[in-house]
Amino acid sequence: CQKLSFLSIVESYCDRAERVVEKELVKRLRTPKDENERMLWVRGVLDAIRSCGHVLEVAFPIRRDNGCWELIKGCRAQHSQHRLPCKGGIRYSKSVSADEVKALAALMTYKCAVVDVPFGGSKAGVTIEPKNYSVSIAGPGIDVAAPDINTGEREMSWIADTYAWTLGHKDINSYACVTGKPISQGGIHGRPSATGRGILHGIENYINNATYMNLIGLKTGLSGKTFVLQGFGSVGFHSMRYLQRYGACCICVEEVDGAIYNADGIDSNELQYYKQEHGTIVGFPKAKKLEGSALEVPCDILIPAAIEKQLTKENAHRVQAKIIAEGANGPTTPDAHDIFLQRKILVLPDLYINAGGVTVSFFEWLKNLNHVSYGRLTFKYERDSNYHLLMSVQQSLERKFRKSCGSIPIIPTPEFQARIAVSYQIMSIATKYNLGLDQRTAAYICAIEKIFKTYIEASFIY
């Protein structure tokens, strides 16, 4: 599977889900009456869902500080336009290729569908290494762009400002072309930490589920759980910070230049201060250097938050985690995925667990279009407020009926849970199709069913 391209890996996961859900989709079609025709219709729609719609490759010259000229290449893929606009980040990396960009665009399509964000999926890449340039080069905002590897608020601000003063100079909504901007440029509070917060809540939804924890032999609750982090960028740092707030203990962190280990725990803020000062986590005084791979360190939760294809057929047997939460896009190859299922390791897939960023980007986009300031995101406030309200109801009932009934817990219905949490939708699909721990296939089915419905109701053939 290491020889498989990133795009082939994404398509392989999609194919698995389509094989499982195909017969169900045929049953749901009302017309045509002939079952064979319905089957052909469904397969045609599924082929359209899987394929990449548009790819744009560009090349442009820049002048270096020494006076020489260099040709920079870039690529933008729009995987699906079943919803508009298309949404996806821009990464700067020497490894950028059309194949990689198409794979990431496909993942964004399924990710948006899973979390009910009404965007099509896209992605962009520019083949440069920013640290080798005195000033980074900002690419054009073809649709709704966002930060990715080696890009952040600064680059998004550049793109938004350039677009607003050129193509969008007559458009009052021009700053909605890019998300992930600084607050002063129309950004939104909570965007930098959104993916990390999403990883926390995604893990929390599963680790508090007794059924799934019994399947993998782990006690419920985050408190006291150990976790290992591969990648200490924005996603890794915020994931580490939030998990520690909920009582989990980070024992190992790995970056491209080395890994550190401390069985008693590593503090996220202290490590962040050290990295900002020294440019690396190596040498952090409150941990020792790890010999070997962090992916193979015994722990309860492993968070690969670096790059794709990190968990493969070669190292999957040596992974000693109970839960793998995919903070990066595409860190697990299909062979490794199968090995984890055989070993009863719960994998929380990328298109669900790291969708916090695109969700908050949607709020930023709405803020720019509506020209309002939402302030800090209200999800946590609303959740806590509703929790206290329900606790008040529970205590009132217990005071009234305690003599005969004892404790009266207020338990949300499965329908209510499915409405407020994507994880319950995925869990219910896994149960319906008897997928067991295979939450990845369940998540892909969840996305495919929603996209399929959009195609059918909008008329697939024009």
Image (spheres, grey):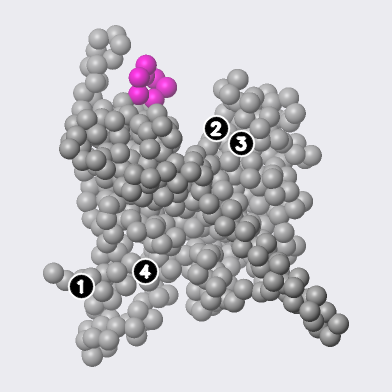
| Dot 4 or dot 3, earlier in sequence | 3
SS at mark 3 in the image = strand
Residue extending farthest left: 462
Say what amino acid the circle numbered 2 marks: Val
Give me the C-alpha separation between circle 1 and circle 2. Answer: 48 Å
Residue 450, label in figure: 4
Above or below: residue 99 compared with residue 452: above
Q: CA distance from mark 4 to mark 1?
A: 14 Å
Dot 1 or dot 2, earlier in sequence: 2
- 335 or 380, nearer to the observer: 380
Marker disc for residue 459: 1
- Identify the mark nearer the N-term, 4 or 2: 2
Residue 133 in the magenta stretch? The answer is yes
Marks 3/2: CA–CA distance = 7 Å
Q: Earlier in the sequence, mark 4 or mark 1?
A: 4
Circle 2 SS class: loop
Q: Amino acid at mark 4?
A: Lys
Q: What residue did someone put label 2 on?
A: 256
Q: Is residue 332 magenta?
A: no
The residue where tag 3 is placed is: 254
Which callout, 1 or 3, points at the residue further toward the start of the chain? 3
Residue lying farthest to the right in this orientation = 403
Q: Position of residue 269 (x, y in %)?
A: 66, 32
Instruction: Give the residue at the far top of this rendering.
Output: 66
Residue type at tag 3: Glu
Task: Say what amino acid the circle numbered 1 marks.
Answer: Ser
How many residues crowd mark 4 within 10 Å: few (<14), some (14–19), many (20+)? some
Q: Which segment is the magenta one?
A: 130-136
Q: Are marks 4 and 2 in contact (CB under 8 Å)?
A: no
Indicate which label's residue lies in the foreground, 4 or 2. 4
Q: Depth check: 6 or 183 in front? A: 183
